[in-house]
Image (cartoon, rainbow, N blue to C red):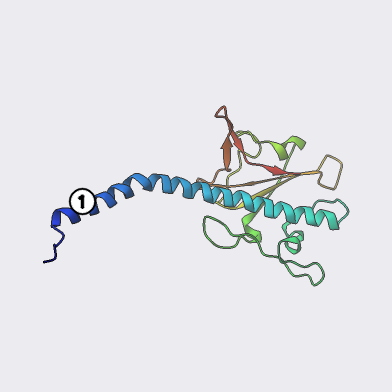
Amino acid sequence: MRRKFPLVEIAIVVAAAALIYVLERPRYEANRVEIRQADAVYNLYVYKAAIENYTVYHNGVYPTSPDSIELYLEGGSTENQTPGQYPQNPYTGEALAKKNIKWVMYSNITDSRDDHPKGANGRQQGTPGWISVGWFIPPGETLATDYGLITFGTEGTPIYKKDPSGQEHIIVIHN
């Protein structure tokens, strides 16, 4: 004669599964946030590569408009003027577009490297996953000499990391 599972044993298995879910859910959510932030920072490197490719083909001159970079994104071609593909926004799952790239003019040469939360990059706000490109053109000049890239997290503030002492630093990718 086969033994049937009593109701108590089934309840124990269901309770154990629910307990595991309740205990692991916060850790899963925290990992999801970190993965999205890492993907957003990766997008900064993709965009930096496009800026640097543009610079190579234009005798060291940095671009100062989003239109000039599209051809240098992955899959783009300068020969037949085909724009490349923008990276995917990790918060929406959709490809970024030119309208998702915020262009900012820095007022000081050190702003492109400023990683302080209350500094030039820390004061910026944006949509999660979007990119901000900041340029510095020295007074009396017409060409940009420095740039910095940041991206925004779920709260619309720049993504940051904490150093070993616990201080926050904006993640800034610059030349």
Quarter of the image with the N terminus in it: bottom left
Query: In the image, is 49 to the left or to the right of 61?
Result: left
Question: Which x, y percent locates residue 113?
Answer: 71, 38
* Residue drawn at x 66%, y 60% as measured from the top left: 98
* Residue drawn at x 13%, y 57% as measured from the top left: 6
* Residue drawn at x 14%, y 65% as measured from the top left: 2
Q: Residue furthest top?
A: 165
For label 1, the SS is: helix
- Closer to us: 105 or 6: 6
Quarter of the image with the C terminus in it: top right
Q: Residues within 10 Å of mark 1 (few under 14, many from 20)?
A: few
Question: Which x, y percent locates residue 55?
Answer: 82, 53
Question: Which x, y percent locates residue 120?
Answer: 66, 37
The amino acid type found where label 1 is placed reads: Ile
Looking at the picture, does residue 159 appear above or below residue 79?
above
Question: Which x, y percent locates residue 31?
Answer: 47, 47
- Closer to us: 118 or 175: 175
* Residue annotated with mark 1: 12
* Residue drawn at x 37%, y 46% as measured from the top left: 24
Query: In the image, is 148 to the left or to the right of 169?
Result: right
Q: Residue furthest right?
A: 59
Instruction: Determine if residue 11 is in view.
Output: yes
Query: In the image, is 22 to the left or to the right of 159?
Result: left
